[in-house]
Amino acid sequence: MSDIDINQVLNQMRTLAAQARLQPAQGLESTTERVDFSSILKQSVDHVNEVQQEANRLSEAFQVGDPNVDLSQVMVAVQKASVSFQAITQVRNKLVNAYQEIMNMPI
């Protein structure tokens, strides 16, 4: 069984938190560019798909006994995939609700 290095897991979590704090600020810098909503949505769905595929790949590698993959990597990747999927699901739900509200507005 592989050793779980809690410091490695904590460092990965801190890195992800730092990246999450930086991403909104980067998006605000380019307000002069035209943003296509459909392309942003497609990129988000593609990113979620990539994260899920990476989690599946790591999980399968751990199951077959790859010495380069430890349990902490697998668990972090699975949690990233889960959070990403939940976030994109919430975005979808908000979009559906907004569409329904618009459709129910009187003309």
Image (spheres, rainbow, N blue to C red):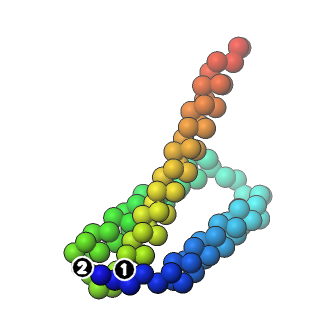
Where is 57 relative to 38, above or below?
below
Q: Earlier in the sequence, mark 1 or mark 2?
A: 2
Apparent side of residue 100 relative to residue 59 in the rendered image (left or right): right
| Residue situated in front as seen by the camera: 55 or 8 | 8
> Disc 1 versus disc 2: distance between alpha carbons?
9 Å
Apparent side of residue 82 relative to residue 99 in the rendered image (left or right): left
- Residue at 55% in and 51% down: 87
Secondary structure at numbered mark 1 = loop
Q: Which residue is mark 1?
A: 70
Q: Position of residue 84 (x, y in %)?
A: 51, 56
- Residue at 37% in and 75% down: 71
Secondary structure at numbered mark 2 = loop
Where is 105 relative to 86, above or below?
above
- Residue at 64% in and 70% down: 17
Q: Residues within 10 Å of mark 1 (few under 14, many from 20)?
A: some
Q: Position of residue 73 (x, y in %)?
A: 42, 75
Quadrant in which the N terminus appears: bottom left
**Res 30 → quadrant:** bottom right
Q: Position of residue 92 (x, y in %)?
A: 54, 41
| Residue type (three-letter) at the residue carrying disc 1 | Asp
**Res 99 → quadrant:** top right
